Amino acid sequence: MHKAAQSELRLARRMARLGTETAFEVLMKAKALEAQGRDIVHLEIGEPDFDTPRNIIDAGVDALHKGFTHYGPSAGLMELREVIAQHVSETRRVNVMPAEVVVVPGGKPIIFFSILALVEEGDEVIYPNPGFPIYESMINYVGAKAVPIRLREELDFRLDVDELEGLINDRTKLIILNSPQNPTGGVLEKRDIEGIARSIGDRNIMVLSDEIYSRLIFEGEHHSIMSIDGMKERTILLDGFSKTYAMTGWRMGYGVMRADLATHIARLMTNSNSCTASFTQIVGIEALRGPQKSVEEMRAEFERRRDVMVAGLNKIKGFSCRLPHGAFYVFPNITKTGWPSKKLADALLDDAGVAALSGTAFGDFGEGYLRFSVANSIENIEKALDRVGSWAKRNL
């Protein structure tokens, strides 16, 4: 018997257009170095280093014992959708009904489903750059044209509204916003949001507003384009539990959108995940309705870490760093080092034992920057700063 030759894997062409998230690749490389005995400071992954609050864990255990282990509706359990609708109504000052809420396993499915449901081949989607890489990945995947709007350091990594207006045309189907922003920590101001709404005018353009870091703001306050008169029906709000309540592994997010679109997003859930895990949804009710002290404590700790990180980076030769106003990242400018971003990130990991991400992991306009997560202890942040400083003295 001759052994059959392995058949060629013939992937669909669209798979060549699908990107990835570099943070997980760098994490794997860092873990491999640790397995060799190296001491690595992890500043690459976008995940709170805090444990899920005890009251939320207890609610999850209780839900399991009470039998919330079965299928639920694709759009989410009604009791959670009611609580989310009330929460969004209060925080965004709009009237939201449960029929406008879809609960999904994490935040990414709202990005994935919204673009699948709305965007045709040849359409244009405007997205922030540097920005969360899944935006550009999904735009390319569906065969649309990804149109970057540059987030500018001189504007504290906010977008230029006039520049945005110049990018909007008859082919624009969707505009993606993210505030507070990954990777820069930039926060859109009220005047920015109002200017974006004016730029859209009465055109039939939807906005995907990624507000997953909305509770992690250090200066100012959060502003949602959903709150602007006339924009609620054209806004898909993305929010969730992972960042605010240190629940990344629980996998739960949600989208808020007009009810007729919510029906189609729920249908995509039916065709992919069936539903979000029922016991985690019960946990979501406790997260939103229970004590919020842990949220403020985590926010305050991230602010302290941010201050230490930025002050330290600004003392290192070749680095300059603005103070981010939200999220838990810093995004230093490293152009004066003379090193390309990817090469420098690799060198810091290999030579200094500090895991960071190249700015180019977040788009072409990220060249000249690195992203450090401050989701680590001040002790480890100070260790990382010492290592980066020593590396700079040796190599710059």
Image (cartoon, rainbow, N blue to C red):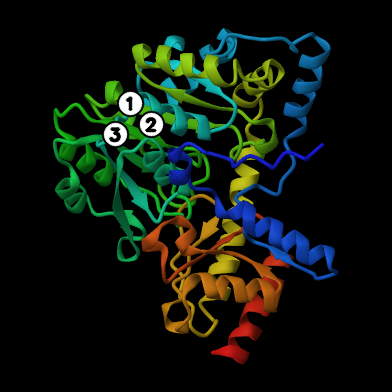
Kindly report the distance in space between the C-alpha atoms of the residues bearing marks 3 and 2: 11 Å
In the displayed structure, would residue 103 be above or below residue 383?
above
Contact check, label 1 and label 3, Cβ < 8 Å: no
Q: Residues within 10 Å of mark 3 (few under 14, many from 20)?
A: few
Spot occupied by residue 186 in the image (x, y as percentages of width and height): 41, 54
The amino acid type, in three-letter code, at marker 3 is: Glu
The answer to whether residue 263 is above or below residue 217 is above
Residue 70: percent from left, percent from top = 72, 9
Residue ID at (14%, 40%): 169
Is 106 situated left or right of 173 in this image? Answer: right
| Residue 377, image x, y percentages | 71, 59
Q: Which residue is mark 3?
A: 121
The answer to which of 73 and 293 lies nearer the viewer is 73
> What's the residue at 46%, 32% (across, down)?
112
Q: Quadrant of residue 152?
A: bottom left
* Local SS, label 1: helix
Label 2 Cα neighbours within 10 Å, binned few <14 / some 14-19 / many ≥20: many
Residues 52 and 334: in front is 334
68 sits to left or right of 306:
right
Q: Do labels 3 and 2 touch, CB within 8 Å? A: no
What residue do we see at 64% from left, 26% from top? Answer: 287
Residue lying farthest front? 1
User: Callout 1, which amino acid?
Assistant: Leu
Residue placed under numbered mark 1 in the picture: 118
Q: Which mark is residue 115?
A: 2
Rounded to the nearest whole Å, what is the CA distance between mark 1 and mark 2? Answer: 5 Å
